[in-house]
Image (spheres, grey):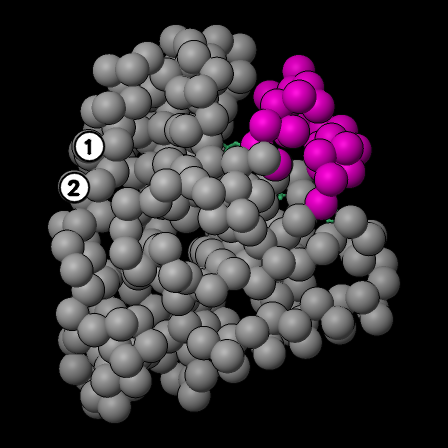
Amino acid sequence: MRPLLPLRLRRVAAAGLPRCFGMARRGGPAWRLSIEGNIAVGKSTLVRLLGKTFPEWQMVTEPVAKWRKVQASSSREASSSQNFGNLLQMVYQEPSRWSYTFQIYSFMSRLKAQLEPLSEKLLKTQEPVQIFERSVYSDRYIFAKNLFELGHLAEIEWTIYRDLHTFLLQEFGDRIALHGFLYLQATPKKCLERLHQRGRPEEKAIQLKYLEQLHTQHENWLVKKTTEVHFENLRNAPVLVLDVNNDFEDDPAEQEELMRKVKAFIKTL
Ligand SMILES: Nc1ncnc2c1ncn2[C@@H]1O[C@H](COP(=O)(O)OP(=O)(O)OP(=O)(O)O)[C@@H](O)[C@H]1O
Ligand SMILES: Nc1nc(=O)c2ncn([C@H]3C[C@H](O)[C@@H](CO)O3)c2[nH]1
């Protein structure tokens, strides 16, 4: 589906609408950005820093806890609080068996995240910004694509996944649109170091090779732009590349510089 207006114009149009007007809330007068990057590159760490620096912004984190403890979502079924298992562990242990299930579930949870309404706090701010940790786009153009190329998704599963993905993104249209991406870039080696340092049990067996493959997928999509994407607004979406090889966690000057770059990027949108 073609967007009615380019994102920039739509934002301007929406910003002029009164706050109570439904469309203004939905399509968003807020700037909507997704943080992308390899496993353990530091996305959650950056989200925390952004949250501290800009407390009025809304952060939507990746729902990894839900993937580690899959439960029914309808209230009646959920009340029995039955735990169906740790899907993250299952996909790492037996990727050919569980990749399709994982991608359907992660895609659905990212879709829900991108549909989240603006928080009360955000509604009161002058320059509202929503930050998402990964997106429906990385679900497809990083992870699902990579799993297909590795042979963990069968041709028929990859076809059904893409069909569903394209259909739902077209159906939701502007409601899930993003204005740009913050791409956290570090060497796969650095990511592996951080992954080991974090010590998530499900990720123990991850090899450097897997992080190298995911690194290449990120570079092809967000830097070289050689990945074929299927959504017009995604093709021209602005990308801010942030080199996070340096350990910024305990370095206030480095943190300040990162925050300055993000702020300046938003001003260019
Ligand atoms: N710039 C940094 N310098 C030093 N350590 C860092 C940096 N960024 C993150 N870390 C550390 O690396 C580990 C992974 O970081 P984090 O959990 O933020 O990664 P992530 O990108 O959110 O991971 P995932 O892809 O699994 O969601 C954590 O232990 C964190 O403290
Ligand atoms: N297979 C697969 N598909 C995804 O879309 C996806 N998104 C995140 N992850 C893995 C990376 C971290 O281990 C952990 C937290 O990011 O979850 C994924 N794995």
Q: Secondary structure at mark 2?
A: helix
Q: Residue at x 48, y 9 (%)?
A: 94
Q: Secondary structure at mark 1?
A: helix
Disc 2 packing (10 Å; few <14; some 14–19; many ≥20): few
Magenta part of the chain:
186-215
Per the image, the residue denoted by label 2 is 167
Q: Residue 213's spot in the image, x, y percent? A: 59, 28
Q: In the picture shown, does residue 183 fall above or below 161? A: below
Q: Residue 5's spot in the image, x, y percent? A: 21, 73
Mark 2 in CB contact with mark 1 (< 8 angstroms): yes
Q: Residue 242's spot in the image, x, y percent? A: 66, 59
Per the image, the residue denoted by label 1 is 163
Q: Main secondary structure of the magenta part?
A: helix
195 within the magenta span: yes
Q: Residue 76's spot in the image, x, y percent? A: 18, 33
Quarter of the figure with the C terminus? bottom left
Label 2 and label 1: CA atoms lie apart by 6 Å
Amino acid identity at mark 2: Phe
